[in-house]
Amino acid sequence: MAAKDPTTLAFYATEAEAYADRQGGVDDARLDPFLAKLPVGAAILELGCGGGQDSQAMLARGFDVTPTDGSAELAHEAEKRLGRPVRVLLFGHLEEKDNYDGVWANACLLHVPRRDLPGIIERIHAALRPRGVFYASFKAGSREGRDRFQRYYNYPSPEWLREVYGAFQWDSVEIEADIGSGYDREPTNWLHVTALKASGMA
């Protein structure tokens, strides 16, 4: 499973320092509800941690966070912020089982080729413990494409995401839409997905 786009990874390799230092803090409006669903000190896997801002916030609140990124260059930038190792992990290389109470994937799975996203969600589902919480955000659309930086995006619709998530056992899947921006500073329609793994599922 490739689950990666070389052109997108090349962008983050080149722009790692600028991307990690960009203005804009943690999105507490999304992070706080995610953390509120978890037990105190919960084990959280962050996928696509970027510059490490979200991991830093979760660590400061006493959670057991494992930060990862698919870009070695971004992982290095996150290590400088966090003062701890950051694992270089491509989504398709996630092999863990029942290890985490939560998986935080803010604005990263949106780069997974559409054909590969079901397999990635299957791996995340397996890595979660029963009743584990999985958050991911996507740039909304109707078909895959690239932005002006030539980064790949899967640009899903809510209906397409429900179909993909629906192949796995969740107690609930909630999708919220809003308008924001990103590194390109352009108005963006976002989809925020929070899924709760079914009880007793391995």
Image (cartoon, helix red, strand yellow):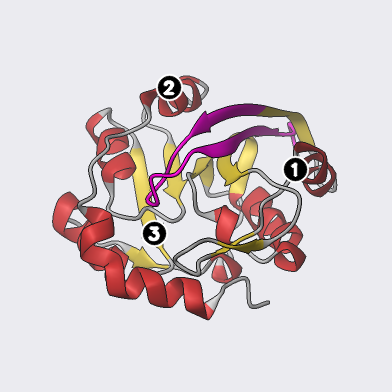
Quarter of the N terminus within the rendering: bottom right
Q: Is residue 150 above or below residue 169?
A: below
Q: CA distance from mark 3 to mark 2?
A: 22 Å
Residue at 44%, 26% (x, y): give it.
Answer: 35
Residue at 58%, 54% (x, y): give it.
Answer: 110
Which of these two is toward me, 188 or 3?
A: 188
Mark nearer the N terminus (2 vs 1):
2
Q: Is residue 134 visible?
A: no
Q: Most prominent secondary structure in the magenta stretch? A: strand
Residue type, label 3: Thr
Question: Which residue was labeled with disc 3?
Answer: 68
* CB contact under 8 Å: marks 3 and 2: no
Q: CA distance from mark 2 to mark 1?
A: 22 Å
Q: Which mark is residue 99?
A: none
Question: Which residue was labeled with disc 1?
Answer: 157
Residue at 80%, 39% (x, y): give it.
Answer: 162
Residue type, label 2: Ala
